Amino acid sequence: MKTVNSNPAPRMSNEAVLAKTGKNWKQWFAIIDKAGGQKMTHQEIVKLLTSKYNVGPWWCQMVTATYEQQTGRRAHHQKPSGFEISVSRTINTSLSTLYSSFENKDSRSNWLGVDGLAVRKKTKNKSIRVTWKDGKTSLDIQFLPKDKNKSQIVVQHSKLPTAAAATKMKTYWGKALDRVLKELEA
């Protein structure tokens, strides 16, 4: 296997992947290489891991994506439909207050500072799916209860065109969620 230094080390430790799959990263990479992994599609590698090695769905994706990252076939944050980032914050506020801060257009514009978002679907106090102002990328915002007066917001921004766009939006969402935190905890 040819490793590419521009990609980070695997997100999961050797110990974690070994405990959950029975093999460490080096063993998985050797197995995939031996099966012709350099010429296989993502789906073909997943099928190999599922059918021949009985790896569960989540771990199939983790092993395959990590192999692709380590061999330079996939960049950090890259998915088949583009790049995707995720940013979250736990905030000292109720779930309904946190949800309303994003769901309500006026409240949202106070901390987000942009307009032109198209809400596609929302489930009160759980999630909002949005088309971003560029009309091309998507947001999946999850709202999770933590305890009586704490809630978590997780923003996934997907279909980003480049690694640079992913890095830019990860920074943007980190700052935006910090503004929400500051506003709601004031």
Image: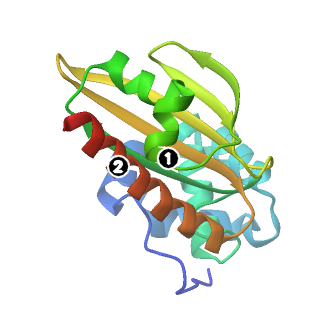
Tag 2 or tag 1, which sits nearer the N-term? 1
In this picture, residue 65 sits left or right of residue 161: left
The residue at which mark 2 appears reads as 179
> The C terminus is located in which quarter?
top left
SS for dot 1:
helix
Q: Residue furthest top?
A: 124
Picture quadrant where residue 139 is located: top right
Report x, y in % for residue 162: 71, 69
Say what amino acid the circle numbered 1 marks. Leu
As drawn, 40 above or below 108: below
Are circles 1 and 2 on residues that touch, CB within 8 Å?
yes
Taking depth in this image into account, of 121 and 108 the one nearest to the observer is 108
Tally of numbered discs:
2
Taking depth in this image into account, of 89 and 101 the one nearest to the observer is 101
Gap in Å between the C-alphas at discs 1 and 2? 8 Å
Which residue sits at x=44%, y=38%?
154
Which residue sits at x=58%, y=84%?
4
Say what amino acid the circle numbered 2 marks. Arg
The residue at which mark 1 appears reads as 112
Report x, y in % for residue 43: 77, 48
Crowd class of label 1 (few under 14; some 14 to 19; many from 20; radius 10 Å): some
As drawn, 27 above or below 144: below
Which residue sits at x=36%, y=16%?
96
Taking depth in this image into account, of 40 and 149 the one nearest to the observer is 149
Taking depth in this image into account, of 18 and 147 the one nearest to the observer is 147
Report x, y in % for residue 116: 71, 42
Asked if one can make out residue 121 in the rendered structure from this viewpoint, the answer is yes
